[in-house]
């Protein structure tokens, strides 16, 4: 067996096998997915609320949502994470993954707000008029007629936001080594090998995102079956 192959297998073993270090990567992947899921759910709630505020007739609500979206989209995610962890929750005994979920959720909410707003505006105004003609209130029309159609329109963008979130959670290593990047760092600290751990998590990220993208594509295809094109 060539020396380079033996060397590669030894480095691979040191990364995953020795001391059961593969457990670190499994745990890191679990936290990465957990943070991403909670973040996108929180972001969806914030995004819908902010989108409705931007579409409201109240100048105050429009101003508040506009400032929130402008500030969050105009500042780096890492800076927001550090502020929330080291300043806002500095004295609170909250797990790092929870703080990370909150930080990424707030960040994602600004982008989802624009996605939802665009989806709502993409629904033909005739749908609103039809709801009103049936005696529905503006709120009933929005929740029963407009939002279901808007959600179908914005599903691809929401799926893309979830994929982006999975990759963005890599910066959670700035506050704790609990994710995939943290697992790679712990291995690097023991093996002094930077290539194999980083290459490994890059492959893991790629495979996970590929699987999620395929699932989202199937869901979108199922929702589009009723469309006549």
Image: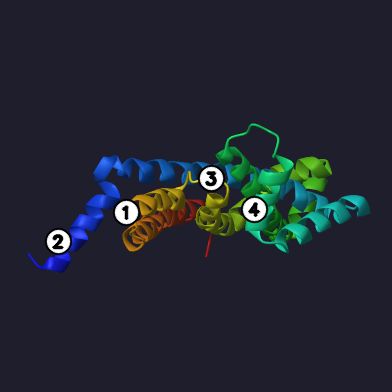
- Residue 118 at x, y percent in the picture: 70, 61
Q: How is the image coloured?
A: rainbow
Q: Is residue 105 left or right of residue 15?
A: right
- Residue 59 at x, y percent in the picture: 92, 54
Q: Secondary structure at mark 4?
A: helix
Number of other residues with Cα within 10 Å of mark 1, as a class: few under 14, some 14 to 19, many 20 or more? few
Reading the image, the residue beneath label 4 is: 108
Reading the image, the residue beneath label 2 is: 6
Inter-mark Cα distance, 2 to 1:
16 Å
Reading the image, the residue beneath label 3 is: 176
Q: Nearer the viewer, residue 51 or 91?
A: 91
Q: Tell me which numbered mark, 2 or 1, is placed earlier along the sequence.
A: 2
Inter-mark Cα distance, 2 to 4:
44 Å
Q: How many labels sit on residues? A: 4
In this view, the mark in front (3 or 4): 3
In this view, the mark in front (2 or 1): 1
Inter-mark Cα distance, 3 to 2:
34 Å
- Residue 25 at x, y percent in the picture: 37, 46
Q: Tell me which numbered mark, 3 or 4, is placed earlier along the sequence.
A: 4
């Amino acid at each position: 067996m060539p020396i380079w192959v033996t060397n590669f297998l030894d480095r691979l073993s040191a990364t995953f096998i020795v001391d059961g270090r593969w457990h670190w990567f499994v745990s890191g992947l679990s936290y990465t997915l957990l943070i991403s899921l909670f973040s996108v759910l929180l972001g969806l709630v914030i995004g819908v609320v902010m989108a409705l505020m931007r579409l409201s007739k109240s100048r105050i609500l429009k101003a508040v949502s506009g400032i929130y979206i402008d500030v969050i989209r105009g500042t780096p995610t890492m800076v927001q994470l550090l502020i929330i962890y080291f300043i806002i929750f500095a004295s609170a005994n909250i797990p790092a993954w929870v703080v990370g979920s909150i930080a990424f959720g707030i960040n994602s909410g600004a982008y989802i707000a624009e996605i939802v707003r665009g989806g709502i505006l993409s629904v033909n105004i005739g749908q609103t008029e039809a709801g009103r003609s049936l005696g529905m209130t503006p709120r009933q029309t929005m929740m029963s007629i407009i939002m279901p159609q808007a959600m179908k329109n914005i599903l691809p963008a929401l799926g893309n936001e979830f994929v982006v979130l999975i990759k963005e959670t890599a910066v959670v290593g700035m506050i704790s080594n609990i994710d995939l990047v943290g697992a790679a760092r712990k291995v690097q600290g023991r093996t002094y090998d930077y290539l194999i751990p980083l290459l490994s998590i890059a492959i893991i990220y790629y495979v996970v995102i590929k699987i999620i993208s395929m699932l989202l594509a199937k869901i979108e295809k199922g929702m589009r079956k009723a469309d006549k094109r």
